């Protein structure tokens, strides 16, 4: 009798242990599924299922992400592979091209062209739009990018990155009876779209981590490259630029050029440095400047404050390109509840400006709402 009781107890224990084993396995599976959901490629697929973007756009973004991984590897190994220094040419904007500018440009072009969902590609390193119509799917997006923003930082191993914007297809009908010049003109005009036609914008920052920031018009999300699995994994969800008490009082811009700015902007910077700008004299704003749009904007996105990029006497229209740098950053800022403006009174919304040429330059003031509104108020009073 005692033996039977012991056997029953033993069997019961095994059944309980087995139940616990299955429960643990189930929890582990749920955790695995949850982790997988955070991978960029799977997250994009889920967004398509939710109706937030179409399948063709998913393919374009995934292609850009793959290109970013390749470029990150090249940036890290640049000193060892001899990919530092100048390539010996200049782009359409007059900037001297670094070796990695040229290499990264080829990688992006190859990735976007092969995905078969873009009709026109505009890049900082190409004088004219690159036609890539393939009649695959319903994509035919206009894809724009700066393959390496801040490339002058590469030789010193300082933050760089890539900026991209994906615009709605628009209209670029190719008539076989037209000359090559006429076709190019039509497609160039189609590429000149305002930021309001952006369906997605983002950047990939190459720094201590490789971070892929993206918006498709439903908030801003960040993914950090996990090199162990080779995937971008969500690290920032529904980012909002800090404001009010949460905002860090940081301003960014090239202090070396302040004397070339308009008098009222010089006074604005002076009051930032004393703290008078927001009634806290003796408590100055902190100054931070990396010299790469991506690096300086990324810090502003996470900490708040303002990034100043006004025109000056040497660059009356600024230096950043509207179509593939300024507008995409503006979209990200607005999606993160920030502001991006330009103009003498800093009251022109960047997203509404339509470029007259694909390489048109533009100034920009971007950051926390209260900081940009504070700049507007100051300029009206001065």
Image (spheres, helix red, strand yellow):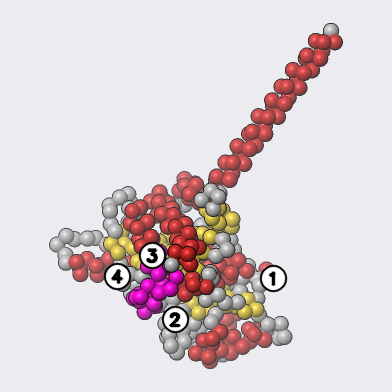
Count of labels in the image: 4
Determine the secondary structure under disc 2: loop
Q: Which mark is residue 245?
A: 1
Question: Of 276 and 309, which appears nearest the observer?
Answer: 309
How crowded pointer 2 is (Cα within 10 Å; few <14, some 14-19, many 20+) is rated as some
Q: Nearer the viewer, mark 3 or mark 4?
A: 3
Q: Is residue 299 above or below residue 319?
A: above
Task: Give the CA separation, mark 3 to mark 4.
Answer: 18 Å
The residue that label 4 is drawn on is 128
Residue 233 appears at what percent x and percent y?
55, 52
* Residue 371 seen anywhere in this rendered image of the structure: no
How crowded pointer 1 is (Cα within 10 Å; few <14, some 14-19, many 20+) is rated as few
The residue that label 3 is drawn on is 103
Q: Nearer the viewer, mark 4 or mark 2?
A: 4
Q: Are marks 2 and 1 in contact (CB under 8 Å)?
A: no
Q: Which of marks 1 and 3 precedes in the sequence?
A: 3
How crowded pointer 3 is (Cα within 10 Å; few <14, some 14-19, many 20+) is rated as some
Residue 134 appears at what percent x and percent y?
28, 53
Q: Which of marks 4 and 3 precedes in the sequence?
A: 3
Task: Give the CA separation, mark 2 to mark 1.
Answer: 31 Å
In the rendered structure, which segment of residues is drawn in magenta? 83-104
Q: Is residue 226 left or right of residue 16?
A: left
Q: Residue at x 54, y 53 (%)?
A: 227
Task: Give the CA separation, mark 4 to mark 2.
Answer: 21 Å
The residue that label 2 is drawn on is 318
Question: Of 376 and 114, which appears nearest the observer?
Answer: 114
Q: Residue at x 56, y 61 (%)?
A: 209
Q: Which of marks 2 and 4 precedes in the sequence?
A: 4
Determine the secondary structure under disc 3: helix
Task: Give the CA separation, mark 2 to mark 3.
Answer: 26 Å
Task: Give the CA separation, mark 1 to mark 4.
Answer: 46 Å
């Amino acid at each position: 009798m005692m033996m039977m009781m012991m056997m029953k107890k033993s069997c019961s224990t095994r059944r309980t242990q087995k139940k616990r084993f299955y429960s643990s396995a189930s929890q582990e599976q749920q955790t695995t599924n949850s982790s997988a959901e955070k991978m960029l490629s799977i997250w994009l697929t889920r967004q398509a299922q939710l109706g937030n973007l179409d399948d063709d756009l998913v393919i374009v973004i995934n292609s850009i992400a793959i290109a970013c991984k390749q470029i990150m590897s090249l940036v890290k190994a640049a000193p060892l592979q001899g990919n530092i220094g100048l390539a010996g040419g200049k782009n359409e904007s007059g900037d001297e091209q670094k070796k990695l500018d040229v290499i990264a440009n080829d990688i992006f072009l190859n990735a976007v062209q092969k995905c078969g969902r873009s009709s026109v590609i505009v890049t900082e390193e190409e004088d004219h739009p690159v036609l890539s119509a393939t009649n695959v799917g319903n994509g035919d997006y206009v894809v724009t990018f700066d393959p390496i923003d801040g490339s002058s930082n590469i030789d010193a191993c300082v933050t760089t990155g890539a900026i991209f914007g994906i615009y709605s297809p628009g209209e670029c009908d190719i008539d076989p009876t037209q000359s090559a010049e006429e076709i190019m003109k039509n497609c160039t005009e189609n590429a000149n779209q305002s930021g309001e036609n952006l369906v997605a914008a983002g950047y990939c920052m190459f720094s201590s981590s490789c971070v892929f920031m993206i918006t498709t018009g439903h908030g801003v999300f960040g993914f950090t490259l996990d090199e162990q699995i080779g995937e971008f994994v969500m690290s920032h969800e529904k980012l909002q630029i800090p404001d009010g008490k949460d905002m860090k009082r940081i301003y960014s811009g090239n202090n070396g050029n302040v004397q070339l700015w308009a008098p009222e902007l010089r006074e604005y910077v002076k009051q930032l440095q004393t703290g008078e700008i927001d009634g806290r004299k003796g408590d100055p704003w902190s100054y931070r400047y990396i010299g790469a749009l991506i690096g300086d904007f990324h810090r502003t996105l996470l900490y708040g404050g303002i990034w100043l990029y006004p025109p000056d006497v040497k660059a009356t229209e600024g230096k950043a390109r509207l179509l593939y740098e300024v507008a995409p950053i503006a979209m990200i800022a607005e999606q993160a509840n920030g502001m991006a403006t330009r103009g003498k009174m800093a009251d022109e919304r960047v997203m509404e400006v339509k470029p007259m040429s694909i390489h048109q330059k533009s100034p920009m003031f971007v950051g926390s709402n209260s900081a940009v509104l504070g700049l507007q108020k100051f300029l009206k009073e001065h």
